[in-house]
Amino acid sequence: MMRAGPITAPEGREGVSKVLAEMCYRGAGEFNSRGLSEALDGLGLQRGGGASGEMASFGGALLADNLGAALELHADIIRRPKLPDSELEPVVALALQDLEALEDAPARKMFVHLRRTYYTSEHGRSALGTQEALERLSAAALRDDHGRRYTPGGAILSVAGRFDWDWLKDAVGAGFGDWAGSGPPAPEPAYRTEAHYEHIEQETAQEHIGLTYASIPPRHPDRYAARMAIGVLSGGMGARLFTEIREKRGLVYSVSASPSEVRGHGTIMCYAGTTPERSQETLDVLVQELRRLGEGVEAAELERARVGLLSSLVMQGESTSARARAITSDYFYLGRVRSLREIREGVEGVTPEAIVDHLACHPAENFTVTSLGPRRLTVPA
């Protein structure tokens, strides 16, 4: 993972990060595009990665015996991609298709707009870019951007599974030991601090509502209390949002709240999908429940949320891919890697009083709201 996501892309080249990450797979080292694909397939690599937010990432899952060969190929993909002119047109065409597909995915379109509206810094950029910027891209511009941003400064490599540590250090050193450069600095997150509402008029059968507000940054000591508070709100079919908005009132077909982080800042992102006729009441009750959480949490609610989070933690521990992603995320946001035991102890240590104290200092307020559909809404004061 490298600091080559949309937030550090050159101005006017929105979408370049996503295109560049894909172009790196279109030939690298001694392989052309087809040869590289066959080499990766020959290792049984289940490829993953891409570019979004702050980072560009490359990786995958495969048999432990093939790890060395996979590291060699990824050294070529990341450090020595060919970036040929002949591959640019089909890659840009795919990127334009992804952008156009937003019109058929109204909830996704709404969230792209919500993020762009909330963040006043580059953190609001979408990895999809814009049609104008994508159509202006050239292979020469990609090669220039690769040289500027694909550097080891801030890069993170994580491996989870069966391997020998000394062997792994030597293998990584062979492929990346002489890699040099620092790359451009990441901008500081900037965001709205007052309530704001925008509506996207679109003739749809549903109304899509997105709401976000500031929470705590990743390294805040209240991290576990904040996470458990969201679990009480939106941790399954027994959580408050599902119970109050869907089960009791029948207002929505989908409702959720989840934490979203960038380096140095955190938010809570909420979504509700409903009908235009029920959209205003849905927003009213959503805001009501966000505010009511600060009045108190019952022990049974907290325990239900705790069990759900600990269950997902167990599942993460059994998946090497999930563990590798968690290692990368921890190191990027926290500057260190937490053990599963530390996370468990943090979750188990949260009390109802800790959640109330946290929300007293960090209340749900100053909402940025975006709605998409045929009906404009009024955000409760």
Image: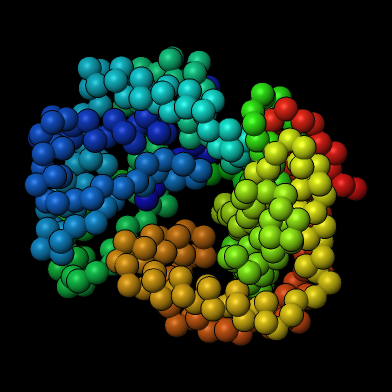
Whether residue 194 is visible to the viewer of this picture, yes or no, is no
- The residue at 81%/46% (across/down) is 281
- 154 vs 128: above or below: below
Residue 144, horizontal then vertical, whole percent: 35, 26
> From the viewer's perspective, is residue 80 above or below residue 142?
below
The image quarter containing residue 17 is: top left
Q: Nearer the viewer, residue 331 or 346?
A: 346
Q: Position of residue 206 (x, y in %)?
A: 65, 35
Q: Is 19 situated left or right of 237 in this image?
A: left
The mark total stands at 0
- The figure's colour scheme reads rainbow
Residue at point 50%, 81% (across, down): 344
Residue drawn at x 52%, y 65% as measured from the top left: 334
Rendered location of residue 83, percent (x, y): 25, 26
Q: Nearer the viewer, residue 90 or 67?
A: 90
Depth order, front residue of 220/179: 220
Q: Residue at x 71, y 46 (%)?
A: 211
- Among the 4 quarters of the image, the one containing residue 362: bottom right
Q: Would residue 379 be visible to someone looking at this image? A: yes
Residue 169 appears in which quarter of the rendering?
A: bottom left
